[in-house]
Image (tube, rainbow, N blue to C red):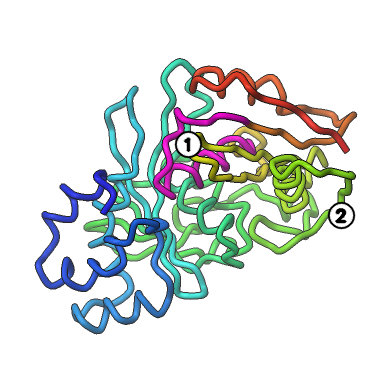
Amino acid sequence: MHPRFQTAFSELPATLQSALLPYIDAPDFPAMLKAEQVEAIKQRCGLDDDALAFALLPLAAACSLAPISRFYVGAIARGQSGNLYFGANMEFSGAPMQQTIHAEQCAVTHAWLRGEPALASITVNYTPCGHCRQFMNELNSGSDLKIRLPGREPATLGDYLPDAFGPKDLDIATLLMDRVDHGFQLALTDELEQAALAAANQSHAPYSNAHSGVALEAEDGTIYTGRYAENAAFNPSLPPLQAALILMNVSGGDCQKVSRAVLAEPESAILTQWDATRATLAALGCQNVSRITF
């Protein structure tokens, strides 16, 4: 079991510990549970979907990186597939506060990067801030996305964000988590560059068309990729580097052990991720950053 889970796991009910152990004890536990695993745990523990998600929140919060706030937030995204995806807030010492990641953003992006086509619900241990509500409003789940909070009545995103401004107001038909392939091509032989380009091809950037992707190589050689996720309100957009760091963190990697990074983006787009990507990676101790353009 990854050390970060040990304390939270030890405080779970014994029945849930026993049901979870075969999965969470795996050395490559990906901070997610597949639908068949979820069903097995629910049956063994007598829990429904919401009860299980609430019970798992301490494990999700254990993935938090909060050196600035010391405020640890966990989130569980339930996909329409039945899979559960962990998320947590992530902060980076030495980087601007704007580069931080909220727990809901983390869980949503985690599901997106794992190939989940749509979400059914988000369970979180603190009420979503306005930033997160707007971020989730970009999802193809729309305002019907269920929001679950401890001690609160079940509600939807529409309840938490009434009279919302979103992609439909700008006549955007392709929404976040819709499957896309933008078809950008380059003659590449480097594996990390190929991974960054593949991520850019699946990014969501309907407002700027500045599609981009980032690939990170950890010190152990593992590659993590992230895609740009734009938002109709612009500011809640999630950069591709943050998406890659999400996948690295939830997978058990160390965000301060990136040995090399590649950004893939258009050569002459109206905006660029280059400076922000380099600056944030420098704060994490990585100077080996390159850029490929299409």
State which quarter of the image contains the C terminus. top right
Q: Which mark is residue 90?
A: none
Quadrant of the rendered structure where residue 268 is?
top right
Quadrant of the rendered structure where residue 91 is?
top left
Residue at image x 66%, y 45%? 227
Residue 241 drawn in magenta: yes
Q: Which of disc 1 and disc 2 is earlier in sequence?
A: 1
For numbered disc 2, what is the local secondary structure?
loop
Quadrant of the rendered structure where residue 143 is?
bottom right
Q: Decide: few, some or many residues near mark 2? Use Cα within 10 Å; few <14, some 14-19, many ≥20.
A: few
Residue designated by label 1: 101
Q: Nearer the viewer, residue 104 or 170?
A: 104
For numbered disc 1, what is the local secondary structure?
loop
Residue designated by label 2: 183
Residue at image x 34%, y 44%? 63
Residue type at the position of mark 1: Ile
Residue 269 drawn in magenta: no
Q: Is residue 284 above or below residue 90?
A: above
Q: Nearer the viewer, residue 13 or 53?
A: 13
Name the spot of residue 122 as percent of width and height, x first: 42, 59
Q: Which residues are magenta?
A: 239-260
How many numbered tags mark residues here? 2
State which quarter of the image contains the N terminus. bottom left
Residue at image x 72%, y 26%? 290
Residue type at the position of mark 2: Gly
Name the spot of residue 133 as percent of width and height, x first: 50, 47
Q: Is residue 37 above or below residue 243?
A: below
